[in-house]
Amino acid sequence: MDKKKITNMEVKKKNRNDVFRYICSNGMVSNPDIAYGLKLSLPTATQITKELIERGLVEEMGEMESTGGRRAKALAVSGNAGKAVGMDITKNHISLVLTELTSKIIKYERIFLPYDKGEDYYREASQKTEWFLKNNGCSKERVLGIGISFPGIIDLDREMVADSFERLHEGEQEAMALWEQYASYLAIAVNNIHMVLDCDLVLGGYVGSCMGESIQKIRDKVLGRNTFAEDGSFIRTSRHKTGAAA
């Protein structure tokens, strides 16, 4: 399939995702707000929110304040829409975070669990995640996705991660060589995942939240391996500094 040709189905999917993200980012909104903010026609925005309501992702929350004329219906992300879970694995701990789809953190917990490559470690990490969900009244069925971040070749101290990118932008040779190696390995993983799942990828964790404009290096390397003609926009960095794994 030629990925340069965008089908109607792909356009509808993109518009639906954009509308849902807009509602997540802005809280209480109306169909006219969505249409104006995303440059969509009002009938298109209304049809998309109707679909999101039917899927249980969005719900009507009364009416917006009047600006003259008929009041528009107030729309917000449904409290039952689902949850996201993040697990951050470090040398001596795992950090677990449970969030709403709006990125609001419900619960954060840091658990002592020294890292080990053995199967027992991952089994215990899984059990602690299940315990974490149960204690916070969240069933597995309500979890829409789990993000897991592992320590890479950059120092586990978050301040050192940020410092590494500062050194990179200053043109320090050691930092540039380290980034070149890291970016090459990461590009292989990102490309493989994209080829299998054909989905957008968000680089989270400490590195993703500090990467900034350096994301272009990853995009260029991925596109160098990519079979299809794509612009690399399917690779994004996390906008959140806290709970970035989720």
Image (tube, rainbow, N blue to C red):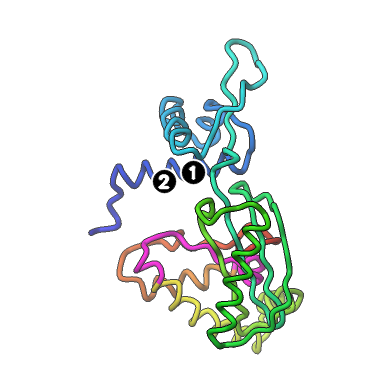
Q: Confirm or deny contact between disc 1 and disc 2 (CB under 8 A).
A: yes
Seen in the picture, residue 30 relative to 38 is either above or below; the reply is above
How far apart, in angstroms, are the residues tagged by discs 1 and 2?
A: 6 Å
Q: Count residues near mark 2 (Cα–Cα under 10 Å), then give few for <14, some for 14-19, many for 20+.
A: few
Residue at x-position 44% and y-position 33%: 54
> Which image quadrant: the C terminus?
bottom right
Reading the image, the residue beneath label 1 is 18
Residue at x-position 54% and y-position 43%: 81
Residue at x-position 36% and y-position 62%: 198
Instruction: Check residue 14 in the rendering and tell me which mark sits there, or answer none.
Output: 2
Point out the stretch of residues depicted in magenta: 193-213
198 part of magenta stretch: yes
In the rendered structure, which amino acid carries the disc numbered 1? Answer: Asp
In the rendered image, residue 52, in percent from the top left (x then y), is placed at 46, 36
In the rendered image, residue 12, in percent from the top left (x then y), is placed at 37, 41
Residue at x-position 66% and y-position 81%: 171
> Which image quadrant: the N terminus?
bottom left
In this rendered view, identify the residue nearer to me: 41 or 31: 31
